[in-house]
Image (cartoon, rainbow, N blue to C red):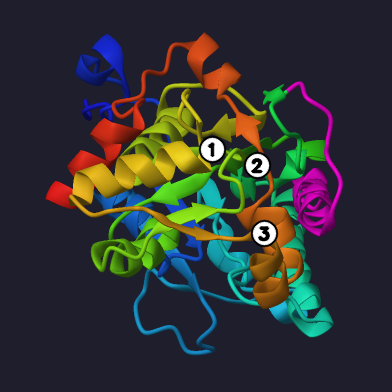
Amino acid sequence: MTETPDAGGDMADRETSVGPRTVAIGGASGMIGSAMGAALRARGVRVRPLVRDAKPKGEDEIWWNPDESQIDHEALRGVDAVLNFAGRSVDERWTETVKQEIRQSRVRSTRVLADTIARLSDGPRTLLVASGINYYGDRDDEILDETSPRGHGFLADVTVAWEDAADPAREAGARVINTRFGAVLAEEGGALARMLPVFRLGAGGTLGDGRQWFSWVAIEDLVRALMWLLFESAMDGAVNVTSPNPVTNAEFTDTLGRELHRPTIARVPEFALKLAFGGLAEEMLIASTRVVPRRLLEAGFEFRYAQLEEALRSILKS
């Protein structure tokens, strides 16, 4: 029997034969896709990356062109689960063209996978799609869980359409999991990687008034949670994947500064952020989203890095 991925509590020591043996991954070369691919291979799972190259270089690669809603349907036969992390980066000023690409890259990639799963009787029975806590919008101090209603704004609209794009697979009887990620903390990519050079120079500081809530998750816990959902749980639907302890932007700034032994006296005014980044600033940098992972916690998943200080210390040490 194979060993259960390190999930939390005594679950980490259990053995099970339940779970996918072959997994296809969209966005396999990205930060999260790469980390999940490594975790799955370490467990003995065959990983099949979805690639845009019309002539895949390896036998495990599966061709797709999500922009044109195309995929090698036959190659998905025998695949047990599909993970989709594909999507255009949101970290640049949002022109109308960029906004369209952000939406289409997420919706089309998910839709072509869901449509294919719905048509294949011997295809994947699990579809796990990356989503985001932007679903909840800017909500001040309100504590948000999976039962909270959707918010407003461009990213909230995108997230709703992104999750709805998986409906054909759900209606065909497949298990569909919409994992709503917080900001993923890792040294090699994501928000933290962009902050580190500035903070290491002693130029880091709060954004706006610093009172906005910042919901985060360490990449190690993110991977553990996704593995747990695949191998330990029958859960479906929306699942928040964030630390149980969100912090304000001011708290995050102070904690990162302490861990780096650097001052954090700088402050970027809200008007300057809006001037430089437009809608991105309003919905990501100064928006307040206080999210908790209620479903994971109630199901027994335990976070290894529930507190920001210990998460940053582990990431920076590595």
Which of the labelled discs sits on residue 262, or is there none?
none
Circle 1 is placed at which residue position? Answer: 215
Which of the labelled discs sits on residue 270, or is there none?
3
- Pinpoint residue 285: horizontal percent, then vertical percent: 61, 56
Count the marks: how many? 3
Mark 3: few/some/many CA within 10 Å (<14, 14-19, 20+):
some
Judge from the rendering whether residue 199 lies leftward or rightward of residue 246; answer left or right. left
Q: Who's the residue at 43% across and 56% down the image?
A: 205
Of the image marks 3 and 1, the number of the one nearer the N terminus: 1
Q: Is residue 155 magenta?
A: yes
Q: Looking at numbered disc 3 in the image, what kind of residue is underneath it? A: Glu
Quarter occupied by residue 90: bottom right
Indicate whether 236 appears above or below 92: above
**Disc 3 + disc 1, Cβ < 8 Å:** no
Indicate whether 28 appears above or below 231: below
Q: Depth-wise, is mark 2 or mark 3 nearer the camera?
A: 3
Q: In terms of depth relative to the viewer, which is nearer, 188 or 176? A: 188
Q: CA distance from mark 1 to mark 2?
A: 8 Å
Circle 2 is placed at which residue position? Answer: 133
Badge 1 marks a residue whose secondary structure is: loop
Q: Is residue 86 magenta?
A: no
Of the image marks 1 and 2, the number of the one nearer the N terminus: 2
Judge from the rendering whether residue 311 lies leftward or rightward of residue 113; answer left or right. left
Q: In terms of depth relative to the viewer, which is nearer, 228 or 245? A: 245
Q: In terms of depth relative to the viewer, which is nearer, 192 or 86? A: 192
Tell me if residue 109 can be seen.
Answer: no
Report the magenta stretch's main SS: helix
**Disc 1 + disc 2, Cβ < 8 Å:** yes
Q: Who's the residue at 51% across and 43% down the image?
A: 249
- Pinpoint residue 162: horizontal percent, then vertical percent: 76, 54
Badge 2 marks a residue whose secondary structure is: helix
What are the residue bounds of the magenta stretch?
A: 147-169
